[in-house]
Image (cartoon, grey):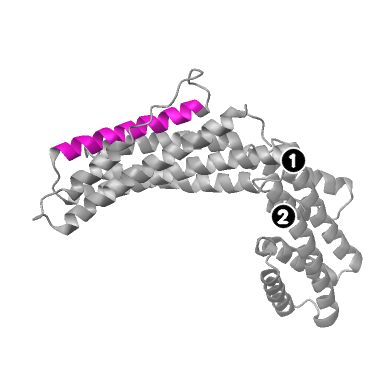
Amino acid sequence: MTIGARVLKTGLAVAIALWVGTLLGLKSPLIAAIAAIFTIQPSIYRSWKQVLEQVQSNLLGAAIALGAVWLVGTSPISVGIVSICVILLCLRFGTEETIGLTLVTVVVIMEAGSQGWQLAADRVGGIMTGIVSAFAVNIAVAPPRHTKRFVKQVQEAQSSMSRLLRTAVSNELKENVFRDDLGKLRKQLRKLEEFYELFAEERVWGQNKRMGRARLLVVYKGMLEALERGVSLIVAVEEHYFAVRTEKAWNRLIDRQIETLCGYHEQLMWKWDGLMKPGASSAAPPQEVSGHLTEMVVGRAEEDEPGSRARLLVVTSSVYSYEERLRRLDKLMEIYLARGEGSDAPEP
């Protein structure tokens, strides 16, 4: 089990919120710690967005709670009804992520309302202290570096996918091992999509940095699409390749083509990491191979069932689709690297 930066920052934010709350003389610094826990986010942009939404929602919740104390009192039924109203308002304004802390604000203020307005203001101050403390920690301590994490996870996913592709046609892996590895690969892709979204939503200053980051996003999107097409090829082979009888020549050709594409994908990642010699080009497969595969399927004996040829065409089209995405990724990398912007460029 590893302790990530977000886990450490959450603990630090809680400690700082308690310390600052004590320095400010808050009667209940524990409220500041609770607010800090709700505010920590995986990116600076999301943290800033969360701060704005939390401040707005909590001030609205505090106003509603104070008004409710004056109008309907602080009975359990009143607190429950006000909580329902606050949830509906948060949903109406599209601030679902702030519901938890806003309800904490409502409950603590209504609970303190009968004890005086000063105590209620103290509780609001504690919540704001926690929000600010968490935001400061998220910016100052180990700011999220999504670029390096994204590329590393792409490399890991490509390695896993390559093993599955290379053994798909030969059917060498045990069924349970294949299913487990394919499930893990799909989870890796979902995590990569989350990393991509985190990186894409970050805001940068300066026209040059924005343009550079936009070009980098195009390359990263190409990496994701290549992996997705590779997974689609694995599924196509698993569902259709073994369901029909195939000729040995076609088997050898598609096996060699998949092996070549795996090596091509591997070399593209080496190129991105700067591991290939200057001037060296990735070993792209001959473009006519996919055409030969299609011709061999279409030219099968007429007595074959149309469904059999359709299945093999699905596999062939998946091979072509994967190859096309790799060639596109190769061009995107060439354009990006030609500008002198390496994959180890600083985070925008």
Label 1 sits on residue: 207
From mark 1 to mark 2, how far is it between C-alphas? 26 Å
Q: Which residues are the magenta region? A: 249-271
Q: From the viewer's perspective, is 178 left or right of 111?
A: left
Looking at the image, residue 279 sits to the left or right of residue 27; the answer is left
Is the residue marked by circle 2 packed among few (<14), some (14-19), or many (20+) residues within 10 Å?
many
Horizontally, residue 64 falls left or right of residue 329, namely: right
- Whichever of callouts 1 and 2 sits on the residue coming sooner in the sequence is 2
| Res 230 label | none
Type of residue at label 1? Gln
Q: The residue under label 2 is which amino acid type? A: Gln
Q: Main secondary structure of the magenta part?
A: helix
Please provide percent x and percent y for residue 95.
Answer: 69, 64
Q: In this view of the protein, can residue 47 be seen by the observer?
A: yes
Is-magenta flag for residue 253? yes
Residue 75 or residue 330, whichever sits in front: 330
- Reply above or below: 322 against 276: below
